[in-house]
Amino acid sequence: MMDPALSDWGLYIHIPFCQSRCTYCDFNTITGMGEDDYRRYVSALIKEWDQQIEIPAGNLVSIFLGGGTPSLLEPALVASILEAVAKRLPLSGQSIEITMEANPGTVNVKRLRQYRMAGVNRLSLGVQAWQNHHLQQLNRIHTAQDARIAMESAREAGFENVNCDLIYGLPQQSLVEWQESLEAVLALKPDHLSLYQLQIEEGTPLATQLKRGLLSLPATDLTADMADIGRMTLLRAGFVPYEISNYCLPGKHSRHNRLYWTMNPYLALGAGAHGYWHGRRWWNIRGIRRYMEAIEAGENVKAGEEWLDRQEEMREYVWLGLREEGGFSRTRFHHKFGVNPEGLLGSVFRRLHNQGLIERDKDRIRLTSRGRDMANYVFREFVGTDQYA
């Protein structure tokens, strides 16, 4: 079985601040805070890293600053976070992927150049849509022109690895608008694209608007067509699909994404951040102010933890692996768990195979084209505990 001590691992750092809250967002974010709050929070992050994290023995391959809107932090604050990490671990520049999420409305060439000098080597721009009326509907603070300028600025600042996020299935979104968004973003020449179907989360303004009949979503068939068009458009443009939602130019996949899908460990810093280490999952205090107060008082900021039993870990490995374009390796599964996947999960695999949702070759098990369209159904088959008695 695989030695956990030798694993590649990642570090997620949560930056919860936003100028305004998007209508679809249920992430752990906060608005209305200023520079003093940002500095206080970064100080808390560094203390958490210095005082409460036991550094793993494996190889750190990825640092991801997510949010929220990390690009609200001054570059000097981002530099201080990375410098704190580097005091305990060598950060050799290009050998470690250091990603920062950014809102196109918060950056310019000077600021991006300073982030790059601080050590950030991969940028993820939350473009989301290309039509300004959709951006306004989502309460985004940027315009399509801001997105174009942000991408041009990123290149001028020296970023050679840039992702753009797009969302499809927006209220009243047409197929033509989705195609326009794809083509406009491709014209910016990103290295990576993430295409996400809009998810309606309870308690968000968007969910409330839909319940009141103020907005309507595209029909299921139309949303499926959008997914197909997204895939075909990016394939024609030379992008490689490596996960259900993620496409990249050759060699530009996200290492951090890959850690998640292969169940490699990742540590986590910040309010509400979730970490995972070989069967143990934990999460921090969610409240931003409470998190800072706890750190300053020398208290433990872990809000809870759970241990996955062996069957839960194997189930999760399967459905996460099926998210990847190539599926998962039976050999690697056996190396990790000491058993063959079919030996434990055979009835589920047979049923999904007979339904035309998965396919198998000598070593790999993956989704079919039909399986990608019904991915959530497939994943649920591996989550239900009754399948593993």
Image (cartoon, rainbow, N blue to C red):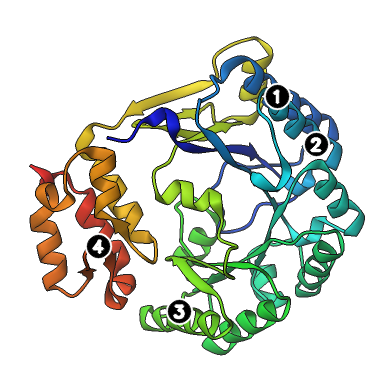
Amino acid tagged 1 = Ile
Q: Quadrant of the N terminus?
A: top left
Q: Can residue 120 be seen in this view?
A: yes
Residue position for label 3: 218
Which labelled disc corresponds to residue 378?
Answer: 4
Mark 3 or mark 4: whose residue is earlier in sequence? 3
Is label 4 in a helix, a strand or a loop? Answer: helix
| Residue beneath the point at 68% across and 27% down | 45
Residue position for label 1: 46
> How far is disc 1 from disc 4 in space, using C-alphas?
40 Å
Q: Can residue 173 be seen in this view?
A: no
Q: Nearer the viewer, mark 3 or mark 2?
A: 2
Q: Which of 336 and 85 is in front in this view?
A: 336
Which labelled disc corresponds to residue 79?
Answer: 2
Q: In which quarter of the image is the C terminus?
A: top left
Pinpoint residue 321: horizontal percent, then vertical percent: 34, 55
Mark 3 or mark 2: whose residue is earlier in sequence? 2
Furthest toward the top, the residue is 298
How many residues crowd around disc 1 within 10 Å: few (fewer than 14), some, or many (20 or more)?
Answer: many
Q: In this view, does 253 lie above or below 70?
A: below
> Is residue 147 rendered to the left or right of residue 284?
right
